[in-house]
Amino acid sequence: MTTRRNLLKWMALAPAAGLLSGGAYAAAGSAPAFISRRPPVGKRKFTSTAVEQLIARTKAGMADPELAWMFENCFPNTLDTTVQIGTLHGKPDTFIVTGDIDAMWMRDSSAQVWPYVQLAAQDKGLQRLFQGLIHRQALSIRIDPYANALTRDPAAKSNLTWSQHDLTDMKPGVAERKWEIDSLCYPIRLAYGYWKATGDVTAFDDDWHAAMLTVIRTFREQQRKDGPGPYHFQRASPTPNDTQYLQGFGQPTRPVGMVHAMFRPSDDATIYPFNIPGNLFAVTSLRQLAEMLAGVRHDASAGAECHALADEIQRAVEIHGVIHGDLGDYWAYEVDGFGNQLFMDDANVPSLIALPYLGACSRDDANYLRTRAKVWSTRNPYFFKGNAAEGIGGPHVGLRMIWPMSIMMRALTASDTREITQCLAWLKATHAGTGFMHEAFDQDVPTKYTRSWFAWANSLFGELIVDLARRHPEVLRKAYVGDRA
């Protein structure tokens, strides 16, 4: 395991006598008592009236008390425990840690607050939070567009022990420098979602504009049409997932128009540098950015560049990222442009199963449906099925380990209520009495899990419940969601 994984050690929880599945003590024969696991009101990092009202409305439509308890614990967890609000360079500033790591990941910080975007128009405090995060992410991109994680102090050296001696161009303010396409896509998704929800353009100033131009330039650099470009990364580690081939520039490719990525959304090294979910996410993000640059910054030239780049990436993905099967085409996970293709899926988003969630395709897209069926099967080497549940994992924490995030993503992209109910049953059966989501759990023994404080997974579970309250409220009105639907 990597240094990071040693830091985030395995947690083996043996339920004590009398400890109910919901995590609350009760006398034998008494009704379960699901006691809130939220911090006391005075110790919460951030409080939103709109969020609290949504929690109350949503819980009122949930008949299963354990699911309702899990929702109330998870949905506000990012606000309760990970947000630091302040001022930096005279602007609102928001720094968001992942949970148990004191650094801000570009991906996680965006995903953690995504479920609250819909509420920002009615909550001035949330608006300031989003303005501050958009400012902070723009600053982070200007510091180093290749960084995946940043320090709280933008002038400080990395505070992560495992990254301090990496062989790459580490700059002040950078906590880790693993180049991942989604690190630049998620801030665009967040800014676009906030703009559409509120109409507020306060945060989209000259610094943000400069950061977005840096995004375009970085994607162009990583098409690598004129050589390997400036980015390279190596780490002295016993785990191959933590470093890259060929002096840190990655495996050979034939430049075809896609964007190279040295690492996946899991922070694990890519095998083939053209990650298909990441490139499809980039297409969507570039089209959103084009609309913002033209509509907010009145920069038609940069907007046109975004569209041209998106078109080029999309064409390349459609030519090189499709596997031609006997029963129809489906997406590869990674390719190299020479014709070599890797099929698998990883629970971290962007993933193949998450493509409709990210706006990269529709739920009923034929290629997607064929891909979806294959990644949720033994055709995917990181699909695991055990006594506790079934789902997708990845190399990050090893075999047999199912990520709840994959189960949530299956439910978020499903239309069949039986499929959704089954996903809820698995999530309910595998939180190990904690009332929170984890990074991963053993397929047979859910009390063996990683990361007890993983805010992205908690936010995503809350997002799923809110989504179901809108799309399929009848699922939440079931009095009891059993272990098997």
Image: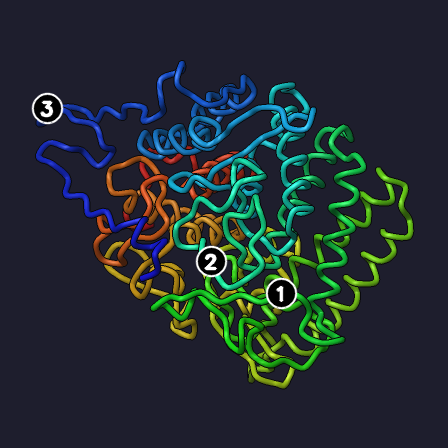
The residue indicated by pointer 2 is 266
Q: What residue type is labelled 1?
A: Tyr
Q: Is residue 184 above or below residue 482?
A: below
Name the residue carrying label 3: 27
Query: Viewed as shown, does residue 25 lie left or right of 221?
Result: left
Pointer 3 with pointer 2, Cβ within 8 A: no
Q: Earlier in the sequence, mark 3 or mark 2?
A: 3
Assign a secondary structure to mark 3: loop
Which residue is rendered at x = 32% and y = 24% of the image? 36
Examine the rendering and report whether any part of residue 418 can be seen: no
First in sequence, mark 1 or 2: give its number.
1
Label 3 neighbour load within 10 Å: few <14, some 14-19, many 20+: few
Inspect the image, locate mark 3, and give the three-letter code of the amino acid beneath it.
Answer: Ala
Above or below, 119 relative to 263: above
The picture places residue 350, in percent across and down from the top left corner, at: 56, 57
Q: How many labels does the image show?
A: 3
Question: In this rendering, would 397 be left or right of 463?
Answer: left
Q: Nearer the viewer, mark 1 or mark 3?
A: 1
Position above or below: 462 against 444? above
Q: Please give the name of the residue rendered at 24% of the width and 38% of the height, measured from the top-left corner.
A: 433
